[in-house]
Amino acid sequence: MSVFTRRAVMALSGAILLGLAAFVTAARAADKIVVGALRFTSHSPSFIAYERGYFKDAGLDVEFKFFQAAQPMAVAIASGDVDFGVTAVTAGLFSLAEKGAVKIIGGALHEDPKIDGSAILASMKAYEGGLKTPADIKGHSFAITQTGSSFHYMLARVGQREGFSTRDVRLVPLHKVGAIIGALKTGQVDSWIIVPHIAKALDGAKKARIIGWVNRYAPDYQVTVITAAARDLKKRDLVKRFLAAFSRGAADFNAGLVDKTKGEDEAARLVALIHKYVYASKPLEKAAKSIRNGAMRISPNAQLDMRSIADQLRWFQSQGMVKPSVKVEDLVDSTFAGKGK
């Protein structure tokens, strides 16, 4: 009996040691990466992939680095401080990509005509003074983070339809989203365009008024893209694993909060998960509505709308912000990007 016991113990010990060895090997095999993000609902696929273990399943040990605007994130990716990021398309991103410092490897947030997307806002002061429609922005001030930002481009798309150019508007660069919100609330700027979880909260609190929607002017707009640092592009398997994990997070987000095909329990679980990163300083019961309001379409399987990227490139070039010689092929690593349209 004692012999059997010793043998059993030895066998069990051997199994435990093998298991521990396998665990240690797996832990050592995980690649450490830094992922850039904004605390927006539209960045939720990364948060979902982290919280639900999709990055871990892909052998990735993820650290988040948070930013308050798109262009600083692009610079951080180019410098190697960040490996991957989801960021708006900007003139700065195009210029960095043209130099080979960073590349677009997929699509993320995309306007959908059937879903409330980026909203056009007027400050209460401007609204009460007659700024009631997007056409009325002409002659008023408009907030942007930086010249050449996605806000700059969206205003141009609105103006193309409404008969004005960005030169007919006083652009006010405020660098950070928080600073813009403060300026809009106090009437220091007249108008802005921002994602719905921020816009609807401002409108609901009567701190600003929604006067239009970007998807009426740019239904094809690829708002954000997935980017990678040049150093990581050589690690092809790493990039593929990142995109696969991110896409799993995007699929959960779309199904649970955009298409709402997974039921209320799943939607509530996702909201609670996202709340760890978005409106985290507010109680969940107060943050939940804003998080749900921010549910915009994320491109399935990181599919990239090449026509939209080409249109954005042409506009930035027409404004002298990007070299005329730059081509879409210089910006996008097509071996990774799932190209659409």
Image: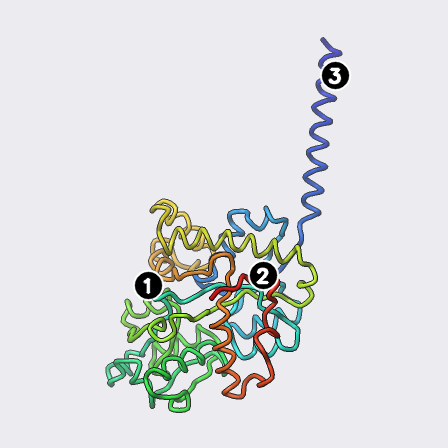
Q: Residue at x 41, y 55 (%)?
A: 254
Q: Which residue is mark 2?
A: 35
Residue 14 percent coordinates (x, y): 73, 27
**What's the CA distance linking mark 2 and mark 3?**
49 Å
Say if 168 sits above or below 90 in the image.
below
Q: Amino acid at mark 1?
A: Lys
Give the side of residue 26 with respect to residue 113, left or right. right
Q: Where, by quadrant of the figure, is residue 216 drawn? A: bottom left
Looking at marks 3 and 1 on the same chain, the residue that comes earlier in the sequence is marked by 3
Q: Position of residue 270 (x, y in %)?
A: 42, 50
> Which image quadrant is residue 9 in?
top right
Amino acid bearing label 2? Val
Q: Are marks 3 and 1 in contact (CB under 8 Å)?
A: no
The residue under label 3 is 6
Q: Earlier in the sequence, mark 2 or mark 1?
A: 2
**Which residue is disc 1 drawn over?**
114
Find out whether the residues at labels 2 and 1 contact each other: C-beta distance under 8 Å.
no
Any mark on residue 306, and which?
A: none
Q: Residues within 10 Å of mark 3 (few under 14, many from 20)?
A: few
Q: Residue at x 67, y 49 (%)?
A: 30
Callout 3, which amino acid?
Arg
Q: Nearer the viewer, residue 306 or 101?
A: 306
Report x, y in % for residue 339.
Answer: 52, 64
Q: CA distance from mark 3 to mark 1?
A: 68 Å
The quarter of the rendered structure image containing the N terminus is: top right
Secondary element at tag 1: loop
> How much space separates mark 2 and mark 1, taking CA atoms?
30 Å
